[in-house]
Image (cartoon, helix red, strand yellow):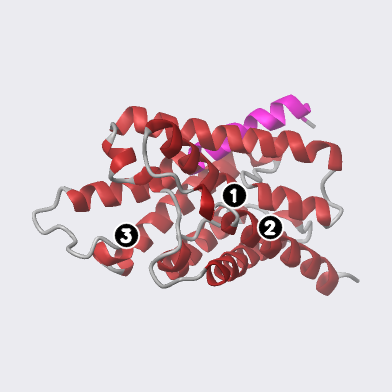
Amino acid sequence: MASLMKRSVAELIGTFILVFFGAGAAAVTLMIAHGSETPNPFNVGIGALGGLGDWLAIGLAFGIAIAAVIYALGRVSGAHINPAVTIALWAAGMFPAREVVPYIVAQLVGAALASFSFAACAGMDAVTIGGLGATTPFPGITFSQAVLVEAIGTFLLMLAIMGVAVDKRAPPGFAGLVIGLTVAGVITTTGNIAGSSLNPARTFGPYLGDMVLGGTNLWGFFPIYVIGPIVGAVVAALLYRWVTAD
């Protein structure tokens, strides 16, 4: 097994890729719409710009990035690339407690570096117009609704992870494809409710980048993307272990 340092670096790189290409796709969607000859007159976010197609494209960007990370780095660190996944595996007794904090720190650092790097590549429009792809509840969605949908979406994601990546009985070679497509599907369906983060690090990076670079301060929403994903992932991991126990 690789050292904890190497595994933490793999988590940093993997989360960087996830946020740069996934959240970056959300930012680009808003930037393209802003520059369109027929701009969105309602100014209410991604789904209103191009309908469900926006969310499908963003979901696929996330899904492809996740699949690439799993196939490239999964053998090194397990490719958690998500604090909720790390915490859920620990809660299910499948990940050592002493490695939880290093993994989460690496994931948060990777997400932050991704957001700053995306701003460096795309310019300040990525911050002022695209918000670096930050997640927020959409108009009319309450705090509790947002937490609930994040929990349900992450529940499905974690269930897929348990079934195709953690369970030793799963057929080899499908983890990246199945998990990536699961994320793409969840984002397509739930993105227009609360942004479909499913991952505290995925939201942390853009929030930090927006704050430091002069964008909107969104930290009041951050508990949604901590509570929902962690609850959903932990419930899924524990339930999977219970229903599949011999």
Q: Is residue 183 above or below residue 64?
A: below
Q: Residues within 10 Å of mark 3 (few under 14, many from 20)?
A: many
Q: Secondary structure at mark 1?
A: helix
**Which residue corresponds to mark 3?**
46
**Which residue corresponds to mark 1?**
200
Which residue: 63% across, 54% down?
A: 226
**Which residue corresponds to mark 2?**
230
Q: Quadrant of the N terminus?
A: top right
- Tell me residue 107's x, y (percent): 62, 38
**Residue bounds of the magenta highlight:** 2-18
- List the single residue furthest toward the right: 246
Q: Residues within 10 Å of mark 1 (few under 14, many from 20)?
A: many
The answer to whether 148 appears left or right of 53 in the picture is right
Q: Secondary structure at mark 2?
A: helix
Amino acid type shown at disc 2: Ile
Amino acid type shown at disc 3: Ile
Amino acid type shown at disc 1: Pro
